[in-house]
Amino acid sequence: MSSEDIRFLHSGPLSPIKRWGTKWSLWPVHLVTACCGVELAHAYACGYDAERIGSLNYGICRQTNVIIVEGAITRKMAKVLRITWEQMPNPKFVIVMGACGLKGGLFWNSYHMVRPSEVVPVDFFVPGCPPTPEALIRAIVQLQDKIMTGEAKTSAEFKEVDLGKLLGVVEEAKPKKPPKSPKKVDPKPEIVIDKPKEVEWEFGQKLVEELQKELAGLFESITITDINRICVKIRSDNLLTVASKLANRFDHVKSVNVIDVPHENKFIVEYVFGSYSNKELMPVLVNVATEVPRDDPRIASLAKVFPSADYMEREMHELFGVWFEGNPWMGRNFLLSPDTPKYPLRKDFKLEEDSYVLEG
Ligand code: SF4
């Protein structure tokens, strides 16, 4: 249907029937983007039953006329949102729920956030974190009222947008000052990962003694940091040997973390080992921590010894630029959108707003 046809239907003699039909046929496409989606589910479940006001979720965008954006939209998701919107027939409406959809909310000033209003034309915002189901239903009812009075914008009234240009505006966006951080940051924070704690943990004391024997000559310190928590500090060139020895007791790497310490020109790399097969070790987490220089952050990959380390190493590589030698995914894009600026979790990463805002 052309823009002219839609305008005729909205303002011509058939317009009351058209508006009435649209009012009672607001069908949002299933596009759950973040945790606000739970509240959307709540609004449509039996308690609130949004279907009684003529709104019913549909799975296929070509048979829907509303997008309810549930909270955060990331750089990757922005393209999905826009492509979904492009595929929906006219007239179509957009409701954005959640503080994240307004201006980033919880993720304000984060490298991966995009405001939905810069990707699609928005009819209603529903504030809150998360907004209540009542608030969402109120937005739907208000949209219906606006449709009936003819005030609701239809997509036909928005200027045509060149999707290719829109998605490629990263280079063309006008320079803007990055927003100020709301936080006070200590320029030289003291980072202690092996602070000992006096706890009653007999099994832990025994385990530490055994680890001290097994890893003799390979560690700098082994500390109980809490009940069920042990920190083993090592030199980075001993990582592979230490991991091979720990493989006798622990069967997986639970997480890989990197701490950026720019004022000491280093990264702290941590591998957390756990066990699913040994009942006594199940609650225990052993944190093996080492340091690598910040200007050449290279360390051996543990992916061959512990396959579960693989994707977490790739993630740390993309976020911090640490190179895990032996992991075949190094240097390749994995999690982030390809246009994300490099190493967004480094402390000196500067968010340039023009690099993530899409302007139509
Ligand atoms: S507004 Fe709150 S509930 Fe909604 S997506 Fe953001 S963080 Fe989640």
Image (cartoon, rainbow, N blue to C red):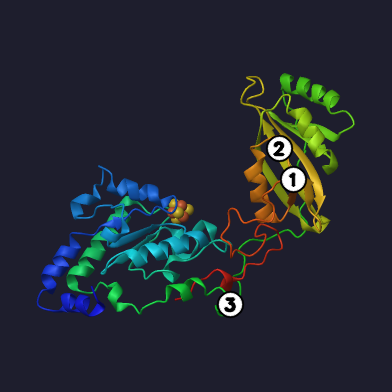
According to the picture, the residue beneath numbered tag 1 turns out to be: 326
Question: Does label 1 or label 2 sit earlier along the sequence?
Answer: 2
Q: Please give the name of the residue rendered at 20% of the width and 74% of the height, measured from the top-left corner.
A: 150
- Calculate the distance from the C-alpha at mark 1 to the C-alpha at mark 2: 8 Å
Residue 176, label in figure: 3
Q: Please give the name of the residue rendered at 19% of the width and 64% of the height, measured from the top-left corner.
A: 22
Q: Which amino acid type is shown beneath numbered disc 3?
A: Lys
* Residue 57 point in image, percent of width and height: 28, 52
* Residue 152 point in image, percent of width and height: 25, 72
Categorize mark 3 by other alpha carbons within 10 Å: few (<14), some (14-19), many (20+). few
9 displayed left or right of 128: left
Q: Which amino acid type is shown beneath numbered disc 2?
A: Lys
Any part of residue 125 in sight: no
Vertical position of residue 244 compared to residue 19: above or below: above
Determine whether label 1 and label 2 are within 8 Å by CB: yes
Frontmost of labels 3 and 2 is 2
Q: Secondary structure at mark 1?
A: loop
